[in-house]
Amino acid sequence: MNKVIKSQPGFSESELNYLQKKYQFKFPKELYNHFLTYKGGTFEKCFFLIEDSVQIFSSFPSRIDEFEEIIDLLVVEERLLPKGLYPFGDDFGGYIFCFSVREEDAGKIYLWQSDLN
């Protein structure tokens, strides 16, 4: 099992439900449970192979206002992410880890590489 390190105790259900209501999405069950347990932090083993490329997961948001800033910028204001993708973490190169709320792929995780999209 890959441990989460450098984290704080998780968000409350009311904090997570606030985000879901404000932005009209639902966290995938596994991610919701993750955020109930952890605030911020990163993975002990943070290297991931994605389509022949090694990505390094940097961090999860550690505050609700961090979540809001990221969602407001990438989803609401700039509309940089494809519709139905919501950010939840990043890598050291500025790429964004997202989860899908689209019907056809709900719960899937994507790495949004801004220089390729």
Image (cartoon, rainbow, N blue to C red):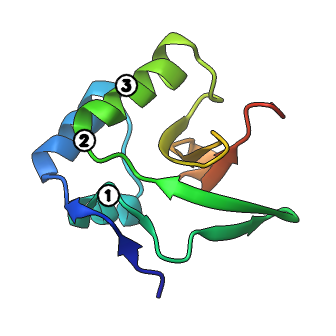
Q: In percent of the image, x 23 and y 67: which residue is there? A: 37
Placement of the C terminus among the 4 image quadrants: top right
Q: Which residue is mark 3?
A: 69
Indicate the position of residue 16 as horizontal and vertical percent values.
22, 45
Q: CA distance from mark 1 to mark 3?
A: 19 Å
Which-is-in-front pick, marks 1 and 3?
3
Q: Which residue is mark 2?
A: 63
Indicate the position of residue 35 as horizontal and vertical percent values.
29, 58
Q: Which residue is mark 1?
A: 32
Quadrant of the rendered structure where residue 81 is?
A: top right
State the SS at label 1.
Answer: helix
Mark 1 or mark 3: whose residue is earlier in sequence: 1
Which-is-in-front pick, marks 2 and 1?
2
State the SS at label 3.
Answer: helix
* Image label count: 3
Indicate the position of residue 53 as horizontal and vertical percent values.
83, 61
Q: CA distance from mark 3 to mark 2?
A: 10 Å
Quadrant of the rendered structure where residue 40 is?
A: bottom left
State the SS at label 2.
Answer: loop
Q: Amino acid at mark 3?
A: Glu
Q: Amino acid at mark 2?
A: Arg
Marks 3 and 2 close (CB-CB < 8 Å): no
For this view, does 98 lie left or right of residue 68?
Answer: right
Marks 1 and 3 close (CB-CB < 8 Å): no
Q: Few, some or many C-alpha atoms within 10 Å of disc 1 (few <14, some 14-19, many ≥20)?
A: some
Mark 3 or mark 2: whose residue is earlier in sequence: 2
Q: Few, some or many C-alpha atoms within 10 Å of disc 2 (few <14, some 14-19, many ≥20)?
A: few
Q: In percent of the image, x 57 and y 45: which residue is there? A: 103
Mark 2 or mark 1: whose residue is earlier in sequence: 1
Say whether residue 107 is visible: no
Question: Where 41 falls versus 65 (above or below)?
Answer: below
Q: CA distance from mark 2 to mark 1?
A: 14 Å
